[in-house]
Amino acid sequence: MFSILLSCGLTKKANTSEIEFIISLQRTACFGTCPIYKIEIFSDGSGIYTGTRFVENIGITKFSLSETQLNLILTKAEAIGFTSMKEEYSEPISDLPTTFIQIKDKRIRDYTGAPKTLKNLENLIDQLYQKAIKQ
């Protein structure tokens, strides 16, 4: 029985059409009313939004991005040198929300002091999610 389960798992992992997680944007709490949510996007364009607090949509919302929209995020990330950016942007200031952004295997913690190009990428992901749920 164990060998059958093991071989099934190996076959599934070998399948190249497997949907993979590729993009995540998470905004955390501050001492005020900062929006708390997470956006996760997969290789097929499907996405999951989880709104926690101080957002219009509380709970889980599924959405889809087009291939063009998905490529826009990935192209923008490449253009700004996302993979070469620091792992963390932070300064000794309190009461700010933290943004975590991940594209493929690279994850950045953005508390404060991040380049404007990174902020623009974070905002692009927000905008594309907002556009997707209005369709």
Image (spheres, rainbow, N blue to C red):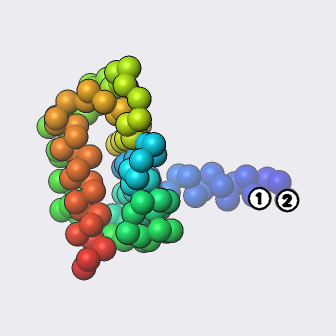
Identity of the residue drawn at 43% across and 42% down:
30
Quadrant of the drawing holding the C terminus:
bottom left
Query: Of the residues shown, which amino acid type is indicated by label 1?
Result: Ile
Q: Secondary structure at mark 1?
A: helix
The answer to whether one can see residue 112 in this image is yes
Q: Secondary structure at mark 2?
A: loop
Quadrant of the drawing holding the N terminus:
bottom right
On the image, the x and y values in percent for residue 93 come to 37, 25
Badge number at residue 4: 1
Badge number at residue 1: 2
Q: Image quadrant of residue 113?
A: top left
Badge number at residue 76: none
Identity of the residue drawn at 33% across and 70% down:
64
Q: Image quadrant of residue 16?
A: bottom left
1 and 2 marks in contact (CB < 8 Å): yes
Q: Residue furthest top?
A: 92
Q: Does residue 84 sit above or below 101 in this rendering?
A: above
Instruction: Decide if residue 116 is on the left or right side of residue 97.
Output: left
- Residue density around tag 2, few if under 14, some if 14–19, many if 20 or more, within 10 Å: few
Q: Does residue 14 sit above or below 92 in this rendering?
A: below
Q: How far is disc 1 from disc 2 in space, using C-alphas?
A: 5 Å
Q: Residue furthest right?
A: 1
Instruction: Decide if residue 1 is on the left or right side of residue 125.
Output: right
